[in-house]
Amino acid sequence: MKVFVIGGSGLVGSHCLTYFREKGWTVEGSHYNYATDRTSYYNTLEPQNKNNFDVISFRPDVIVHCAALTNVDHCETHEEESYQHTFKSTEHVCELSMICGARMVYISTDYVFNGDHGPYNENDIPNPINIYGKHKLLSEQLVINSIIDSLVIRVTNVYGDESRAKNFVARIIKQCQDNKQPFCLKLPYDQFATPINAYDIARAMFCLISDKKKGIYHLSSTDYMNRVELAKKILSYLNNDQFINVEPVDSSTLKQIAKRPLLAGLLKVKFTNEYPTFVFNSVDNYLASIRKYSFSEWKHP
């Protein structure tokens, strides 16, 4: 199996590169802004860019599109930029998939839902409430309607080992590392989601691709919690958690530019029915695995 991972230097993409290669697949990954020694440059908005990795010569069987503009507030105030980096980039990847005769996997989000009645299963009707969610939904629909046997995987609150430490779990740990004086984190108690380890996404995606699955799948772990609960769980594993005070606040007091789906999150009903023995890791599993390092020695892989 030959796979091209767009966004291979990001959280989900980097885990796909690692896991797929461990399983014996031939895998190439791309970067756009964040270069790594494992990825090649590819600009999805400029398919003819002479610096792009030669995907057509690589002849992938599958193209995995992980890249995204995920700053929800930025998308809300920069609608055209969001449209270009989310929808137009996906449109170009669809065209690339058709040229290569490759199946396509698109990574999406629970932000395609309004957050009134989550967590959501695959049969629930999307109804996004912000620009980011609207553009992700448009991109989902494009992939499903354009590419035969395509796969859309929705995930949310992704965490895990990451060189840039951008995900929520890694950011909390890094803040504890970098701050030697007490400080306060104001976090919403009314925003719920289903955190998932990027490693598990790669494992589950491997199963889905191997078995030639198609359509929409939700992936999630056993955890369903708000940001306050997640932060406190992280702090409970750190040696100097006394430096951080978590202050629960209502979302309205944060004055976030883009509306957030409050009761969000995903139910992996379809995946579980088809892979009942697959075991996802929990946040506790992940934190326990890195707790073997003392707080001062903890490093991002």
Image (cartoon, rainbow, N blue to C red):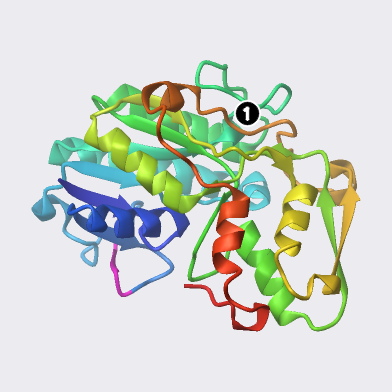
Q: Nearer the viewer, residue 259 or 284?
A: 284
- Residue 227 locus on image (x, y percent): 75, 48
Q: In this view, does 294 lie above or below 72?
A: below
Is 199 situated above or below 115? below
Please tell me which residue is depicted at 63% across the width and 79% down the height of the picture.
294
Which image quarter holds the N terminus? Answer: top left
Callout 1 crowding tier (Cα within 10 Å): few <14, some 14–19, many ≥20: many
Which x, y percent locates residue 4? 24, 51
Which residue corresponds to the image point at 49% horizontal and 65% vertical from the top-left? 162
Please say whether residue 92 is visible from this viewpoint.
no
The number of callouts visible is 1
Residue in the picture at 82% in, 38% down: 190
Q: In this view, does 271 lie to the left or right of 42?
A: right
Q: Callout 1, which amino acid?
A: Pro
In this rendering, position of residue 85 left or right of residue 62: right
Q: Does the magenta stretch include residue 39?
A: yes
Q: Give the range drawn in magenta.
A: 37-42
Q: Mark 1 points at which residue?
A: 128
Q: Position of residue 165 (x, y in %)?
A: 56, 68
Toward the viewer: 174 or 166? 174
Left or right? Give the position of 157 relative to 199: right
Splitting the image into 4 quarters, where does residue 167 fall?
bottom right
Let me know if residue 199 is in the magenta part.
Answer: no
* Left or right of 177 on screen, residue 212: left
Classify mark 1: helix, strand or loop: loop
